[in-house]
Amino acid sequence: NSSYDTYVRNGLPVGPIGNPGMQAIMAALNPSEDEHISECFFFATDADGVTYYSRTLAEHEKVCREHGIGMYA
C-alpha cells in the first residue's frame, strides 16, 4: 500500500513524476530542432551519460542490448 502504486491509486503518484522541473517544462515547450532527435520516440542513457535516441522500439532495444542499458545491464 504505497502512494507510488499506480495500480491501486488513481492519478499521478507523489514526487517528481507529478511535479516536473523547469528543464522538463522548457524541453516540452521548446523541443529539439535536430531532425534526428525530433523524429525519435525512445531514448536511453548509458552509465557514462551518453544518450541514444531511437525511432522504433526495435532500434531502442538493440541500443540497450549493445550498450548494456536498463534490463540489459
Image (cartoon, rainbow, N blue to C red):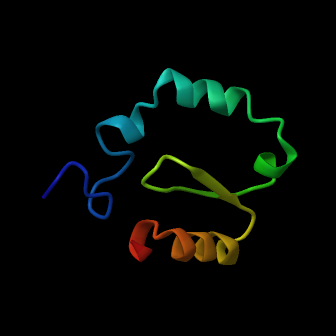
Residue 59 percent across, percent down from the top left: 69, 73
Residue drawn at 56 percent across, 74 percent down: 66
Quadrant occupied by the C terminus = bottom left
**In the rendered picture of this protein, how many numbered marks are placed on residues?**
0
Q: Position of residue 40 (x, y in %)?
A: 74, 56
Q: Give the image location of residue 47, x and y in percent.
A: 42, 54
Quarter occupied by residue 15? top left
Please report the residue visible at 46 percent of the width from the left and 26 percent of the height from the top. Answer: 21
Q: Residue at x 34, y 52 (%)?
A: 10
Q: Answer with left or right where residue 25 lies relative to residue 14.
A: right
Query: Which quarter of the picture shows residue 23?
Result: top right
Name of the residue lying farthest toward the front: 48
57 over 50 or under it: above or below: below
The quarter of the image holding the N terminus is bottom left
72 in relation to 2, above or below? below
Question: Which of the two residues, 69 or 1, is positioned nearer the viewer here?
Answer: 69
Q: Residue at x 39, y 47 (%)?
A: 11
- Which residue, as the protein is rendered here, is positioned at the far right? 35
Q: Would residue 67 be found to the left or right of residue 12 on screen?
A: right
Which of the two residues, 57 or 70, is positioned nearer the viewer here?
70
Q: Is residue 33 placed above or below 38 in the rendered structure?
A: above
Q: Nearer the viewer, residue 59 or 10?
A: 59
Q: Looking at the picture, how far across and down is residue 5, in whole percent? A: 25, 58
